[in-house]
């Protein structure tokens, strides 16, 4: 049985549904700056396992990318949504891309943001060693170890103070063993780089230009996958927070065009 994820869904008033999936050490509150999209879409925000109000994975099988995708599909079934638009950020983008590949008939169109893990070429021994060291640190030192991770929201330089406070509080509430399990099982297996050519639904990458580490992957998509549109915005890894108006505008324009097709 897939994990039962916590859902924060707008009422069903006939607007097209839009699923929003956050990254590691965050929560459904990651999308608070994008509430304006609810004027046009039925927003469905979830908490991933070990985050927010969702339970932690209890074993390796619950922490695999395939199991996480099944848990997302269970959300659609619970809400009795026939098909939806989907959007993911970072770790969440790796999952929404995999969801689109696994359940293509359920996805009208999709948006994703900077996601290094989703587009990684290979999982090298060096990456494995660093990942295992981080996992050992987390299992030994808990949230103190997580606060040393570069993407912990307490380090965010371009978030407003309220977002830093909210997401830092959410990061402190994550389940330590659950995060360690996701890093151990899911992270080495996140990449869907070799399968992007299989995507048949309209797809948009909203790229935060200031995240230098991601730009090689962004350029590779632009050169090799013409079926994926790219919108570059001034901001970094969490572009929906750092440039909310630009992000909202890009998503709205892209998704509304799909609704008219």
Image (tube, helix red, strand yellow):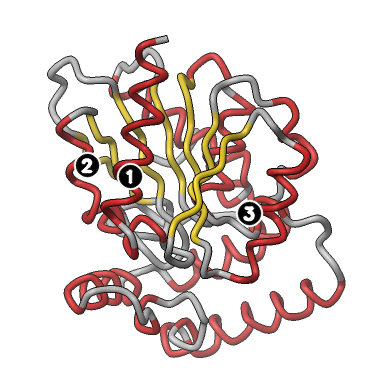
Residue assigned mark 1: 46
Secondary structure found at label 3: helix
Res. 60 mark: 3
Number of other residues with Cα within 10 Å of mark 1, as a class: few under 14, some 14 to 19, many 20 or more: many
Can you give x and y, in whole percent of width and height, for residue 254 in the image? 41, 30
Q: CA distance from mark 3 to mark 1?
A: 21 Å
Q: What is the distance, in whole Å, between disc 1 and disc 2 at their CAs?
A: 6 Å
Q: Secondary structure at mark 1?
A: strand
Please report contact status of discs 1 and 2: CB closer than 8 Å, yes or no. Answer: yes
The CA distance from mark 3 to mark 2 is: 26 Å
Mark 3 neighbour density, 10 Å: few (under 14) some (14–19) many (20 or more): some
Quarter holding residue 156? bottom left
List the residue tagged with mark 2.
8
Closer-to-camera residue (18/132): 18
Local SS, label 2: strand
| Res 232 label | none
Mark 2, residues whose alpha carbon is within 10 Å: few (<14), some, or many (≥20)? few
Residue at figure coordinates x 36%, y 15% from the top left: 259
């Amino acid at each position: 049985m897939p994990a039962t994820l916590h859902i924060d869904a707008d009422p069903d008033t006939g607007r097209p549904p839009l699923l929003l999936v956050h990254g590691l050490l965050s929560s459904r509150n990651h999308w608070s700056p994008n509430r304006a999209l609810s004027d046009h879409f039925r927003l469905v925000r979830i908490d991933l396992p070990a985050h927010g109000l969702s339970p932690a994975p209890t074993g390796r099988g619950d922490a695999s990318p395939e199991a996480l995708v099944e848990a997302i599909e269970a959300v659609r079934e619970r809400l009795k949504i026939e098909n939806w638009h989907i959007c993911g950020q970072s770790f969440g983008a790796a999952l929404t891309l995999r969801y689109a590949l696994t359940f293509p008939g359920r996805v009208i169109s999709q948006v994703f943001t900077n996601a290094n893990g989703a587009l990684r070429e290979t999982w090298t021994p060096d990456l494995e060693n660093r990942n295992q060291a981080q996992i050992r640190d987390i299992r030994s030192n808990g949230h103190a170890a997580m606060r040393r991770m570069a993407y912990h929201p307490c380090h965010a330089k371009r978030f407003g103070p309220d977002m830093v406070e909210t997401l830092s509080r959410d990061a402190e509430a994550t389940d330590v063993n659950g995060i360690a399990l996701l890093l151990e099982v899911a992270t080495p297996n996140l990449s869907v780089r070799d399968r992007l050519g299989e995507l048949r639904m309209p797809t948009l990458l909203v790229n935060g230009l200031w995240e230098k580490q991601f730009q090689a992957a962004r350029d590779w998509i632009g050169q090799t996958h013409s079926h994926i549109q790219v919108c570059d915005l001034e901001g970094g890894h969490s572009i929906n927070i750092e440039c909310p108006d630009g992000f909202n505008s890009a998503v709205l324009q892209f998704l509304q065009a799909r609704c008219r097709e």
